[in-house]
Image (cartoon, rainbow, N blue to C red):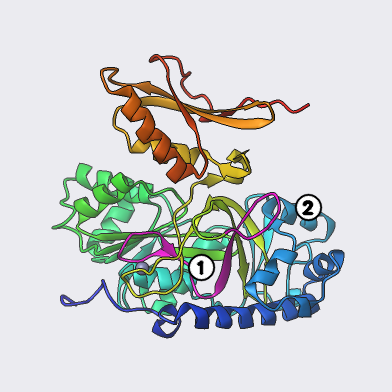
Amino acid sequence: MSQLDRTSGYFREDLETMPWAEKKAYLDGKLREIVQYAYGHAKAFKEKLDSVGLEPDDIETIEDLEKIPVTKKADLVEYQKKDFPFGGFVGVPVEELRRIYVSPGPIYEPGEREYDEIAWTQGLYAGGFRPGDFAVNTFNYHMMPFAMNMVDNSLNMLGCITVPTGVGNTELQVNILKNLKVTGFCGTPSFLLTIAEKAEEMGLDLRRDFNLKVAFVAAEMLPESLRKTLEDKFGIILRQSYGTADIGSLGYECMEKNGMHLPDDKIVEIVDPQTGRQLPPGETGEIVATAFNKTYPLIRFGTGDLSYLIDEPCPCGRTSPRLVGILGRTDQLTKVRGVFVHPGQADEVARRYSNIAAYRVLVTREKDQDIMTFQVELKDEQVDKEKLKEDLQNTIRDVMKVRGDVEFIPQGTIPEGGKKIEDKRTWD
Ligand SMILES: [Zn+2]
């Protein structure tokens, strides 16, 4: 195993390297199939199409999805109250289910007998996992489908040997990693850090005493600094995937670490959260996804997470566009002159200037015009403020896609823990 190539190749080369036009046609075909199926088998989906006067034949391509109202997580809870237990979002008779999962909400989720989602496995492979890896699955096995169904089955699909450790028992986990010479870790980045600290406390050397090669993380934000710490400590490759327990994986990192490739068994749209209209690459909106799962046909499921798509080619050879990362939640969005702005963008602007001590964005309205002002406290006041102001204004336009004024204010003006985007507009 010493020469094992973990950094190239594909889990599904046919799909992952398929030219985008061809893949689009492939996804359109899968979409037509699931729409026809769900209309005939999932009561809630039929009602949804009927409510907007659509027939399944009206949905032929990804663009047509715009016509279908988005279903949010909160909607699922409401549907389930009315129609026990799945709110009509189930595509097979209940007696054909393998399990019923319970996600926070609570939301009851129908579990298929034969797991065939490839998206997480694509992510494991792209992140360096290979057949024969011994992998600990430290996600929570109880109730929710993620660890037990998605990760467990995906490791199996790839040909890895899973140690179903679940969460907690840190000292025992350290011993398992060491004694079984585990090569792969699946879990949250913060739990891997906890394991590292525990092992060091036990006097172990993270590189010499362990055989860890790869880590697959999800379910948590991954700061680059934490990735680097963990990769350096263990001498491993650490990559993340993104998804939800309802619909599965919606993106995975490759070796390039330049965003998360869309998997090939979902349709992922970025939409205006108010209108449900699709947004082009580069524009921030809500991640809305459609899976081809006949047991649990979720069509246009709104995640509530914000991102945008990058469609420049990736050096890894995969042709799917990439999600840039998770930028926040839809409830943090503010619209300025018709463009959504959110705290993640403001952070990005501030991150590019080492002299910024604190900042906030004010949105006001004068003469029926929205005004966005980026207020900045400087660490060092002895700078060319005119030049800095001009640079900042350019960065704001690049990152936030809307023009903004810059105002320098004295240190200590911005209250700690206050809102990053303060909307002061009044509407009367
Ligand atoms: Zn790539």
Residue under the point 52% across and 41% down: 402
Instruction: Please provide the residue range marked out in magenta.
Output: 252-279
Query: Which amino acid lies under the numbered mark 2 shown in the image of this protein?
Result: Glu
Q: State whether the magenta stretch is mostly helix, strand or loop.
A: loop
Task: Label 2: state its secondary structure.
Answer: helix
Residue under the point 33% across and 38% down: 352
* Residue 180, percent from left and from top: 26, 66
* Residue 74, percent from left and from top: 71, 50
Query: Which of the 4 image quarters holds residue 67?
Result: bottom right
- Report the image quarter containing ligand 1: bottom left
Whether 265 is among the magenta residues is: yes
Q: Which residue is mark 1?
A: 150
22 versus 176 height, above or below: below
- Mark 2 Cα shell of 10 Å, populated few (<14), some (14-19), many (≥20): few
- Mark 1 Cα shell of 10 Å, populated few (<14), some (14-19), many (≥20): many
Residue in front for this viewpoint, 403 or 11: 403
User: Looking at this rendering, what residue extends furthest in the bottom direction?
Assistant: 14
Task: Label 1: state its secondary structure.
Answer: helix
Q: Which residue is mark 2?
A: 78
**Image quadrant occupied by the N terminus:** bottom left
Residue under the point 63% across and 72% down: 62
Residue in front for this viewpoint, 327 or 283: 283
**In this picture, residue 43 sits left or right of residue 244:** right
304 versus 163 height, above or below: above
Residue in front for this viewpoint, 24 or 97: 24
Measured in 3D between alpha carbons, the distance from the residue under mark 2 to the one under mark 1, in whole angstroms, is 25 Å
